[in-house]
Image (cartoon, helix red, strand yellow):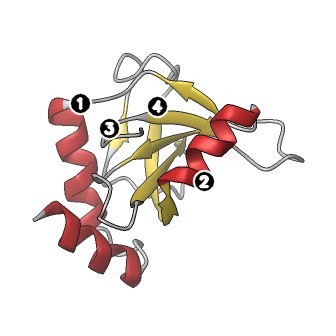
Amino acid sequence: MLACGDCFLAGAEEDEKLHLRIVATPPAADGCVVVVSVTTRHRRSETLVILQPGDHPFIRHESTVAYRYAEISWVDNIEAAIASGNAKRREPIAGDLLRRIQAGLLDSEFTPNGVIHFAREVLR
């Protein structure tokens, strides 16, 4: 079962590049979690949470958490994607980095309102 801090790689079929996704909340009673996406840092990237090489084994260059892409997902759907090979499980994150990502989730002006509301409920 996926837990808060677990990571996986996913992307659209036509997208050659898979993105690191992080389960940013514990599962709610209905089995939903908030998932955030890590992207390469560009000039217009949101810079609330910047990740450096070494913060996670997958990160090889400066990256950011793109809160605009945060979404509520069913744990069962993520696990099915991993089981089918459409997503790949990666090393989890924990501690201070996870807390920074969770704080950014609630603080970012780009996080969708429904995601903020859900996250506030499960992170209490």
Sequence-wise first label, 1 or 4:
4
Eye-nearest disc, 2 or 3:
2
Other-residue count near label 1 (Cα within 10 Å), few / some / many at <14 / 14–19 / ≥20:
few
**Point 23% across, 35% down: residue:** 97
Other-residue count near label 3 (Cα within 10 Å), few / some / many at <14 / 14–19 / ≥20:
many
Q: Is residue 19 visible?
A: no
Looking at the image, residue 10 sits to the left or right of residue 120; the answer is: right
* CA distance separating discs 4 and 3: 20 Å
Looking at the image, residue 32 sits to the left or right of residue 48; the answer is: right
Place residue 51 in its image quadrant: top left
Sequence-wise first label, 2 or 1:
2
Across and down, in percent, residue 103 comes to: 19, 57
- Give the residue type that dot 1 points to: Ala
Pointer 3 residue: 5
Pointer 4 residue: 62
Other-residue count near label 4 (Cα within 10 Å), few / some / many at <14 / 14–19 / ≥20:
some
Which type of secondary structure does the marked residue at label 4 adopt?
A: loop
Observer-nearest of 3 and 103: 3
Is mark 2 in CB contact (under 8 Å) with mark 1? Answer: no
* CA distance separating discs 1 and 4: 19 Å
- Give the residue type that dot 4 points to: Glu
**Point 40% across, 46% down: residue:** 23
Is mark 2 in CB contact (under 8 Å) with mark 3? Answer: no
Pointer 2 residue: 77
Other-residue count near label 2 (Cα within 10 Å), few / some / many at <14 / 14–19 / ≥20:
few
Which type of secondary structure does the marked residue at label 1 adopt?
A: loop
- Give the residue type that dot 2 points to: Asn
Which type of secondary structure does the marked residue at label 3 adopt?
A: loop
User: Which mark, by number, is residue 94?
Assistant: 1
Place residue 19 in its image quadrant: top right
Q: Which quarter of the figure is the N terminus placed in?
A: top left
